[in-house]
Image: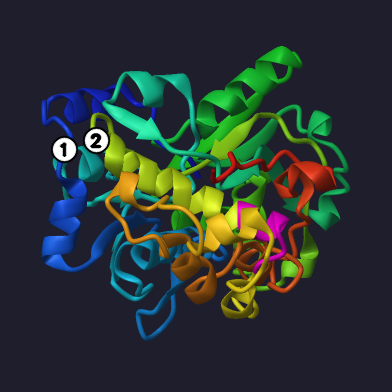
Amino acid sequence: MRTSLMLGVTAAVMGFAVAASATTLEDVKKKGFVQCGVSQGLKGFSNPDDKGDWTGIDVDFCRGIAAAIFGDPEKVKFTPLSAKERFTALQSGEIDVLSRNTTWAISRDTALGFDFRGVTFYDGQGFMVRKSSGVKSALELDGATICVLMGTSTPLTLADFFRANNMKYEPVQFEKDDEVVATYESGRCDAYTSDQSGLYANRLTLKNPDEHIVLPEIISKEPLGAVVRHGDNQWGDIVTWTLFAMLNAEELEVSSSNAEGMRASENPEIRRLLGTEGKFGEGMGLSDDWAFNIIAKVGNYAEIYDRNVGEKSPLGIPRGLNALWNKGGVQYAAPIR
């Protein structure tokens, strides 16, 4: 579920030699919408329904960016991209921001001409197996056939895990996630590996989800976040502070349902967040109610998490590391002041 490390993709991306425009915000305003790169369909993160309407935490994040700029979360268009296509689409300018369950790693942050602008979801690679296999731990997979998505860092992490534990395995690789899932469900593979969030999401697509379990081990760190082209700091700031606005709103208990009323709050932190005190939009080329528009029209971080991947969603993924720093997690936003 993560961004490509393939040398061929790296070479293709670097071949563009296209510097990030210093006027991304102006370009976005001129065309009247944000072009957001998303997955080709991952429940809970970015997934279209039969009518072509997109939902997911990555989708809501893009809607937040649109709300910050235009005051309208619907002024966004989505470009579905495979793992192999996503870097090229961002570097070429086909999309303005990549919000597609992409892992922040040094090779992507320093060698491809991109900037990661925060962590929208802390994840980690795991395994799914059939309950009937009797397997309870990834350490019992010696000699197993493993279905895995190519064009991502997942195969490398898989190889590292088996090598570190002196175990053998046979990888079965495909370029598209639906092919990986279908092959696993057909019985060709003993296990399926991906980010745990992806395992929970794709488990729902199986004919009999209850016959499959996600094993407890997490074998990697996968901080997922939005990516922009390197060099346009103003645009990068807008993307970062969209996330920080959502996180600060949750911490201050400001939500889509009470944001309007909270504008009358005497709490200076809330007043700065909602734009009733200070001029904190000017530095990004935005109106001072940029964060209010995000929260009122899209929601705080808890809202987008719960409805897409959390307890109020079919995935039911616990907050875990994605809880706020003062509630046992590691999500932490810089202050607005």
Q: Quadrant of residue 249?
A: bottom right
Label 2 vs 1, first from the N-terminus: 1
Quarter holding the C terminus is: top right
The local crowd at label 1, few if under 14, some if 14 to 19, many if 20 or more residues have their Cα within 10 Å, is some
Q: Quadrant of residue 313?
A: bottom right
Q: How far across and down, in percent of the image, does residue 324 sit?
A: 74, 47
Circle 2 residue:
232
Determine whether, in the image, residue 35 is placed left or right of residue 134: left
The local crowd at label 2, few if under 14, some if 14 to 19, many if 20 or more residues have their Cα within 10 Å, is some
Q: How far across and down, in percent of the image, does residue 53 sit?
A: 39, 79
Magenta residues, start to end: 248-254
Determine whether, in the image, residue 20 is placed left or right of residue 86: left
Q: What's the mark number on residue 51?
A: none
Determine whether, in the image, residue 42 is placed left or right of residue 166: left
Residue 213 higher or lower than 321, as above or below: below
Q: Is residue 264 magenta?
A: no
Q: How far across and down, in percent of the image, does residue 160 sit?
A: 62, 19
Q: Quadrant of residue 130?
A: bottom right
Whether residues under marks 2 and 1 lie with C-beta atoms below 8 angstroms apart, the answer is yes
Compute the Cα span from label 2 to label 1: 5 Å
Circle 1 residue:
22
Which residue is painted at 64% across and 55% down in the image? Answer: 268
Which residue is painted at 64% across and 71% down in the image? Answer: 255
- Identify the coloring: rainbow
The amino acid marked with disc number 1 is Ala
Q: Name the residue nearer the viewer: 92 or 216.
A: 92
Residue 29 higher or lower than 103, as above or below: below
Which residue is painted at 57% across and 79% down in the image? Answer: 260
